[in-house]
Image (cartoon, rainbow, N blue to C red):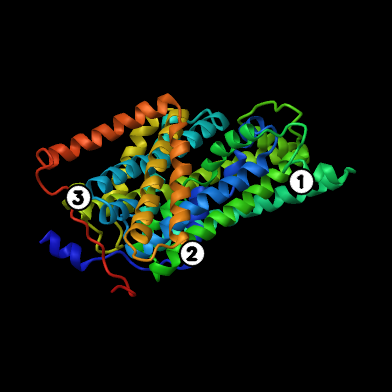
Amino acid sequence: MPSDTNRAVSLRRALTLWDLILYGVIVIQPTAPMSVFGVLSNRGKGHVVTTILIAMVAMLFTAISYGRMARVYPSAGSAFTYVGKTINPFLGYITGWSMVMDYMINPIICIIWISQQAHVAIPAVPYAGWVVALAAVLTWLNIQGIRTSARASAGLALGMGVVIVLFFTYASRYIFGHSHDVAFFLRPFYDPSTFQMGNVLGGTSIAVLTYIGFDGISTLSEEAENPRRNILLATVLTCVVIGILSALEVYAAQLIWPASEPFPDETTAFVYVGARAWAPLFAILGITLTVANFGSAMGAQLGAARLLFGMGRSNALPKAFFGSIDPKRRVPRNSVVFVGVISLIGAFLLDFDLGAQMLNFGALIAFMGVNAAALVHYYIREKEKKLSNLIPPAIGFAVCLLLWLNLSWTAQIAGSIWMAAGIAFGYWKTRGFKGELVQFDVPADELGS
């Protein structure tokens, strides 16, 4: 019977701590701040480094909540399971539905971005051709198994790492090739002539997007070695690694291109910065950003498939389809293919801007849910009330709520339509919420109780 098969076949525990960190870095992208550098510089009046570092501290609180909840429930369902098991099954279902939007939109907007850039570079191949090819390749890679995905992530990280080193090399040569006073090197952190807290906080609300994707690590809990330890470490370390690397990238960029000088194009500002340091970097960085989006799309599809598997196994989605595992490669093949098909369709229906805003809508709801779950589990239900169990999730929830409330009306409307559809599906599935909505199934790991 299908149920017996699903019990007999499990996901393969093959991911080390290093694999998890690589996955997180690839999904977030080690080049993450490059695409928003121009926007951050204009919004923060040049204090890009400051906004990146403040955002890192804010996201670390949420990362801690994710890691701590993974200790309690090492499940591929991630936030869906954490909220559902800790607070309420219906709220868990809502959180999972918001995560589905977040994870499904990520590969879509990456495919849109790559296809548009590829079509400009090679106009002989139509946009539709690039979309189909990318969706097919991404799906094929993720079907091959978790080790194949991990090796591909390592390869992409290595390639992007080489380009980043190249940028730092020529950026340093350019910066130190000119004479500057001490104030020049401190200006990216604090410029008294332009500093305004409102501008910096406004920039921080955008800089937080640099870290969107770290939560995907928790969806690999059932494929990680020692998940109760490694998921927390990988989630926090990924935020720190991306934060420090991002700060260094924008620090060098701002020294090369002062905020007082307008960019030729805000969206591609970092490419122009690279070209000022060394002309060939204009093309090299353009290619690198394409590769980064490919890696992010692959990682996002991987995480989306694991989330759908977790929701399918828990009967929040049709279990026979989403809750099954391929017995040979031990991956949720049906979920991987489903995400691939949705990515293909979505790339033709959405534009990049709306897709990015919808992604943030879903991600921030999930972040709030996980922080709330950590607060309930580790503080409210504990007899001994410790500030260390109160402050991180409380701050994480408050920051995410503030950011969510400041999303554009377009994103709020589109996201609300998606959430309404999820509630309607749950209503139909349970015949008016009279039946059981979710059957959570959290498998034991080698440290399980």
Sooner in the amino-acid sequence: mark 1 or mark 3: 1
Q: CA distance from mark 1 to mark 2?
A: 32 Å
Of badges 1 and 2, the one in the foreground is 2
* 446 w.r.t. 439: above or below: below
What residue does disc 1 label?
171
Sooner in the amino-acid sequence: mark 1 or mark 2: 1
Q: In the rendered structure, which amino acid carries the disc numbered 2?
A: Leu
Residue 300 in picture, x, y percent from top left:
41, 47
Residue 66 in picture, x, y percent from top left:
41, 56
> Is there any visible trace of residue 448 in the rendered image?
yes
What residue does disc 2 label?
233
Residue projecting furthest to the right: 179
Residue found 33% across the figure and 41% down from its top:
98
Q: Is residue 384 left or right of residue 10?
A: right
The residue nearer to you, when weighing 321 against 328, is: 321
Query: Circle 2 — which element?
Result: helix
* 449 w.r.t. 291: above or below: below
What residue does disc 3 label?
321
The residue nearer to you, when weighing 412 against 285, is: 412
Q: Is residue 216 left or right of residue 423?
A: right
- Crowding at dot 3, Cα within 10 Å, few <14 / some 14-19 / many 20+, comes out as some
Residue found 13% across the figure and 49% down from its top:
436
Q: In the rendered structure, which amino acid carries the disc numbered 1?
A: Ala
Residue 401 in picture, x, y percent from top left:
43, 39
> Is there any visible trace of residue 284 in the rendered image?
no
- Crowding at dot 1, Cα within 10 Å, few <14 / some 14-19 / many 20+, comes out as many
Q: Is residue 391 left or right of residue 381?
A: right
Q: How many marks?
A: 3
Q: CA distance from mark 3 to mark 2?
A: 33 Å
Query: Circle 3 — which element?
Result: helix
The residue nearer to you, when weighing 10 against 356, is: 356
